[in-house]
Amino acid sequence: MLNNPSSPVCGAMNGTERKKAQIYIGSEYGTLKEVIVGEANGLNPSMQAKWLQEALKVLPEAEQKIAIKNAGKSWNECVVDDQNGITEYDLIKAENDEFVGILTSLGVIVYRPTLLSKQDVEKLYGSEALINGYSQDFPRDNLIIIGSHVIEANLRTPLRRTDIEGFRSLLMEKCRVPEVKWVAMPHMPLLGDYSNDSPLLEGGDIIVLDKTILVGNSANLSVGSNQIGYEWLKNYLGSDFDVIRVPLSENVLHLDCALSVPRNGLAIICPEAFTEGIPEILKNWDLIKVNMEKLPYLVVNGFPVDENHYIMGYNEKEDNSEIREALTKRNIHVYPIFFGAHNAQGGSLRCATQALLRET
C-alpha cells in the first residue's frame, strides 16, 4: 500500500487540491469525469462453494436456475443461444460496449480492468480459489471511494474477492499523488469460513452524499456489508464524516439496489427495503418511490453522469418506464440501455462501474 491505515484522515479538498487529485468522489451525482467499467470476463462459482446457496436467494427464481446450470463454467462456455452459439460473454460484452459508448459520448474517460485468467487466479491465490470463481463485470464492490480516500474493501462475497487484481496497475498510477489516501481494510482469508466479527464492506452498500455516508447492512447474512464493517468505516473516516448505518431487508443485496441519487434533493427509493425507515437525510427530499416487487429486476440501480443526465438499465421483465418518465418530468435526460445479462448476474449499471473522479 502507498499509505498506511493510520495516516491522518483528510477532510474535503479545496478547488486547487481537487484539480491535482486523480481520484475524488464527493457525491453520487457530481459531474463524472473518469470511471472504471467492468469487463465480460469471469468464472462462475462451483456448487462446491458453501456460500452459493444462500447468496442465490437474492436472485429471481429463473436466474437461480441459470446460475445452478452454469456453475463452474467460464462465461465463454455458458451458451445461452444454442442455435447461434451466443454465450454469456457475448451478451455482457455487447451491453458493456453500448454503456461505454454512452459514457464516452458524454465526455467521460473510461478505464477497464486488466483481464484475469484462471491461471492468474491460481498463481496469485492458489487452485482452491477457483471454487469461488471470479467476476470482472461488477467493479463496484472491491473499492470504496469517499472524497480522496480509496479503500480496498473486505468483501463478504467470495466470488469477487480476487477481482481487485484487475485494478492494481491503475491504482498504482492514480494513487501516487499525496492528496489521495489508499488503504486496505483488514482482510480475512480468501478460503474457509469467516467469523461474524470480521469487518465486511462492499461498495454497493456505500452511498456518498457530501459529508454524509450511508452504509447498507442487509439482513441476509450471506451477502453485503455488516455492522462491524460500518463501525470500521466510521472509525477510519473519523469526525469529518457522518457515517450512518442503514439496515436493509434480507432480500436486498446492497443499498444501491434500493436507493439511487440522481441529483441533490432527489432520490429513487424503495421505502419497504429499509427495515428501520428511510435515512433521516432523505425524508424531506423529492422521492420517486418503487415497490419491493420490482427490486429483483434492479430497477433502482442506475448511474448518474451528472445532475441532468442519468443512465438507466432495463431487461425483458421490467422496462423501467415509470422511473424513466418520473426522471424526464424532472428535466433529467435518461439514457435507457438493455442490461439483461448483467441483471441476471445480480447487478446493473452502478454495479458495473467504479466512479473515480467527479467534479462538485
Image: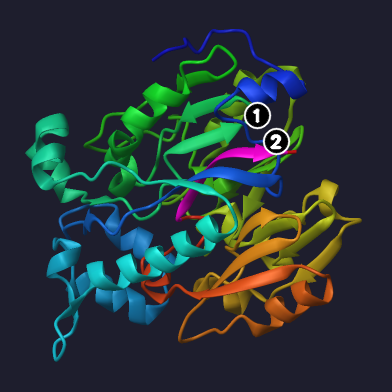
Looking at the rendered structure, the kind of residue marked 2 is: Gly
What colouring style does the render use?
Answer: rainbow
Residue 180 placed where, x, y %?
Answer: 56, 19
Image quarter in which the C terminus is found: top right
| Magenta span contains residue 291 | no
- Proximity of marks 1 and 2: CB atoms separated by less than 8 Å: yes
- Give above or below for 117 relative to 62: above
Q: Mark 1 points at which residue?
A: 147
Q: Which amino acid does label 1 sit on?
A: Gly
Is 89 rendered above or below residue 280? below
Where 91 sits versus 244, above or below?
Answer: below
Tell me how far mark 1 sits from mark 2, CA to CA.
Answer: 5 Å
> Which residue is depicted at the point 91% across and 56% down?
284
Provide residue 81's location: percent of width, then percent of height: 20, 86
Q: What stretch is highlighted in magenta?
A: 352-359
User: Is residue 140 in view?
Assistant: no
